[in-house]
Amino acid sequence: MSTLEFFLAGTLSAATVFLLAALGELVVEKSGLLNLGVEGMMAVSAAVGFVVTFETGSHIWGFALAGLSGVVISMVFAVVAITFLANQVATGLAVGIMGLGLSALIGREYESRTITSPADLVIPYLSDLPLLGPVLFQQNIVVYLTFLLAVVIGYTLTHTRLGLAIRSVGEQPSAAHALGFPVYLIRYATVAFGGLLAGFAGAYASTIYTPLWADGMIAGRGWIAVALVVFGTWKTGRVAFGALLFGMISLGELIAQSMGARIPSQLLSSLPYIVTIIVLAMISTNKARMKLHAPFSLGEVYDGSEGR
Amino acid sequence: MIKKIAKRLATVAVAAVMVQNVASAETLEVGILLPSPIADVGWSHALVAGMDAVKAKHGDKVNFNVVENIQEGPDADRIMNKMVGDGAEFLLLGSFGYMNGGLKLAKRNPERSFVHASGYKVADNFSPFTAKYYEGAYLMGMAAADLTKTKKLGVVSAFAIPELISTINGFTLGARSVDPEITVDVIWINSWFDPAKAQDSAKALLANGADILFSNAQDTPSVVSVGEENGAYVFNLNSSMKEYAPTKYLGVVKTDWAPFFVASVDAHLAGNFEGANQWLGMQDDVVVVEDWSDDISAEMKDKIKAKQDEIASGAVHVYDGPLTNQAGEEVVAAGSRLEDGAILGIDWHVEGINSPLPK
């Protein structure tokens, strides 16, 4: 595999971790909630996914239970933030930190173990194309499904009644309530969905992308996912673009080094974060545009009992 | 259910009291503080394996209190203070960043003994210890030179600190002592701990033409398993990861801390522990190279063995001149040797390494 092929193909698989988690968080934020616990949810489900796959040898079970564990952790957030009306930032952080500790506990006996990742899905004929073949048509099935999911979520949010319900809950929950939307139910559902995707992202990280378990292996990728949602100004296409960009930067850094680039590696290592800061600064200079896309009630506590 | 819990708590309490009693009966309490989880492989594992030799020698006369996975910082200081408060007489501090907190504690408790990994500060009862990894890496370089076809070797490395730089230099010098055409690519991931990044780096090195990988100070088998998957020979430091690369494992530069730990504990028990900078290598039986790949030619194996004996006896030194830096300037003249202090603080790469050194 040439360096260019590796770079482009690797970008897609690196982006998948970010994109899965970011898509989940996007839906959550569209419904007006800010769940900062993504890193912790990913860590727990990475541990669960690894342990299950290690013990059963089945990647499908690993993914299923990892997704489930993501949902369970996200429900802790949902109960505290939605039902008990707690501050969402504090709750999300607490759940995230709890998740990191929990993941260390779950993976305790499995530290530094490895498994084999499933074979890539090679699409016949197309994969023989020069350059495009290995890049686009020799990836893990999860990579294909994730990008497909991005399209589905993008369409659902903008073109369906369900998407309208989620958005209206995120913009103005009391108005949505008056219109007859079950605000709490919708928010519980979006948080669970976010947990599910964070769970899949964790499982992808620990069983396919880097098929081993080591405490702390998520290493900040959950935080990048949260940043990506803002980076993409709450638009699915831009979030997907951001995920690809981040995948590309994080991999490009390593390739630049391997080719002997005369750039300090510390600078290269901090590049993804520098880019985030620059883009966030650029986006927020245009306040009107920022307001247009950000869910109006994002992060605000909504007490459904008041309106009754 | 509640009864059960109460019962369990009671047993724990009784056990705790018993431990206290045992402790008072002439047992040496040993506190061990580790930066990462004790896995089946890796840094913390190697430290604990070394302490097991102390246990084997003294049996019930030593009692270990092991706390693992503690980040460098205030938390570590708190825990080591508590260890001393609980009666630990001998402490093993397993990470560079425990240095300042540990040293303060040592100065307040002159009757207790401390050994500290990777540091450089010394006190009467505080010994930093480091391994001369470069000695083993030199031999690995020779083996790599025997097996490489592309004449390109790849290193995935954590941080550009002297300990790691000197190891990469040793590896390069060993490889180029066999074949001066060999070049080495290095990727600094600037993290002790990011298996995903380590694996991506390993793949990037392979894509760029390297066919031998060196996992430098990566505690997980991340790089090692990439080597196996892609058919590239791979080696690592500290403890053997052969099971993760059964067919492509080049070998391990192992650290066997047992001789040093046993000697230190014995010295403490005899009351003559003296703090000193313990920089240990093959001569001290601390750096051990083993699990050699069967694919290395017999001829090269003999050469490696001969070199190993020369290094261990002190006849030959890895940093014997002439040594040239990346810019092609001679740093150490023929006939002279780089001083220990210069190796401990090394901030330059030898000729043959393509990648620039982050400053």
Image (cartoon, coloured by chain):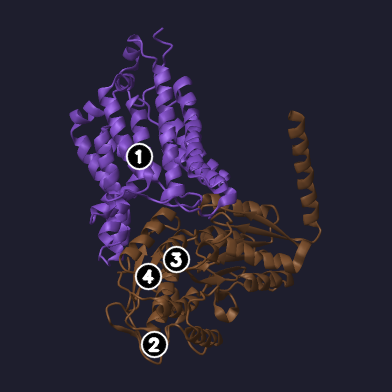
**Residue B229 point in image, percent of width and height:** 43, 61
Side of B182 where A59 appears, left or right: right
**SS under mark 3:** strand
What color was chain B assigned in the picture?
A: brown
**Residue A18 point in image, percent of width and height:** 35, 43
Chain identity of mark 1: A
Residue at (30% x, 23% y) in the render? A163
Of the residues shown, which amino acid type is indicated by label 3? Ser
Spatial distance from mark 3 to mark 4, Cα to Cα? 13 Å
What color was chain A assigned in the picture?
A: purple
Of all residues, the one furthest to the front in this rendering is A125
Residue occupied by mark 3: B215
Quarter of image, res B164: bottom left
Q: Nearer the viewer, mark 2 or mark 4?
A: 4
Quadrant (top left, top right, bottom left, bottom right) of the C terminus of chain B: bottom left
Of all residues, the one furthest to the top in this rendering is A308
**Residue B203 point in image, percent of width and height:** 36, 60
**Which label number is shown at residue B211?**
4
Which is nearer the eye, A237 or B146?
Answer: B146
Residue occupied by mark 1: A145
Chain identity of mark 4: B
